[in-house]
Image: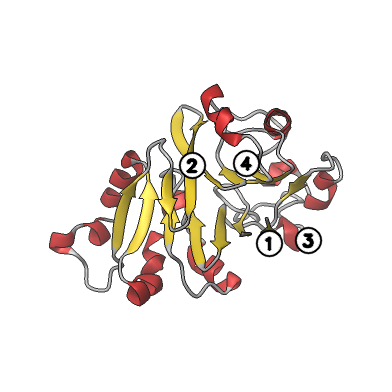
Amino acid sequence: MKITFLGTGTSQGIPIINCKHPVCLSTDKRDKRLRVSILVEWDNYCYVIDCGPDFRYQMLRAGVSKINGLLFTHEHADHTAGLDDIRPFSFQMGAVPIYAQKRVLTYLANRFDYIFNEHNKYPGAPSVTQHQVDVQPFQLHNLQIVPIKVMHGKLEIRGYRFDKVAYLTDVKTIPQSELEKLQNLDVLILSCIRHKSHHSHLNLDEALQLINTIKPKKSYLTHISHMLGFHAEVEKTLPPNVFLAFDTLEVNV
């Protein structure tokens, strides 16, 4: 299995428009972060988790020629705003399978009415097939996917476990029952927004505490804001098995 980090930034990306913060002015390419998303590939299958406003460029930059579907963690714009840009894939393969909670599917149908409304479908709009994600595992081809219920502040959202890899973004807390689904991981991908406490995201101390609880072999931090600091400096402070993800990073599991 190969994981490609398509984007590792928070909702505004890095650099932020008109921001003079030193991290936003950094020349280190690892400090340039598009909105958070990953590509998951195994055998001959290819899925994207979240489809934010940078989706088009992310697909071009990664050289993606096909996808088998999209999984959504939740409905916020930095995770969903690029849905219209699945058009080339839809024209190639037909309706693109999308997987999300019922609430998220309803949100997408309202925001992208011209895609979902078959009675008044805009010519040239992409087509999708909807698959509702609850808490039960589901099958994608030859692999079982385990949804993980996590809390983004007061909003219940989904993470996903693919075999020995788990992807959890926009996390603030995880119910104890869900932690049991995260045992024996080779790789944990976990959001970490900054040093200071945040009302709906893990800060660095909280993320490291959660990693210590779950005890994966390796962890990669994502959904990073400029307030966390320079990539090169922050990574030096992390435990040996914890790394800052960066855009275009590929991890083979």
Distance, label 2 to label 4, CA atoms, is 18 Å
Distance, label 3 to label 4, CA atoms, is 21 Å
The structure residue drawn at horizontal position 41% and vertical position 46%, both measured from the top left corner, is 138
Instruction: Find disc 2 in the rendering and name its residue.
Output: 146
CB under 8 Å between discs 3 and 4: no
Distance, label 3 to label 2, CA atoms, is 36 Å
- Badge 4: how crowded within 10 Å, few (<14), some, or many (20+)? many
Q: Which mark is residue 250?
A: 1
Distance, label 1 to label 4, CA atoms, is 17 Å
In x, y percent, where is residue 74? 43, 43
Q: Can you tell which of label 1 and label 4 is closer to the viewer?
A: 1
The three-letter code of the residue at mark 2 reads: Val
In x, y percent, where is residue 141? 43, 58
Q: Is residue 58 left or right of residue 91?
A: right
Q: Which mark is residue 191?
A: 4
The three-letter code of the residue at mark 1 reads: Glu
Is residue 78 in view? Answer: no
- Badge 2: how crowded within 10 Å, few (<14), some, or many (20+)? many
Q: Can you tell which of label 3 and label 1 is closer to the viewer?
A: 1
- N-term-proximal mark, 3 vs 2: 3
The structure residue drawn at horizontal position 70% and vertical position 52%, both measured from the top left corner, is 245
- N-term-proximal mark, 3 vs 4: 3
Distance, label 1 to label 2, CA atoms, is 22 Å
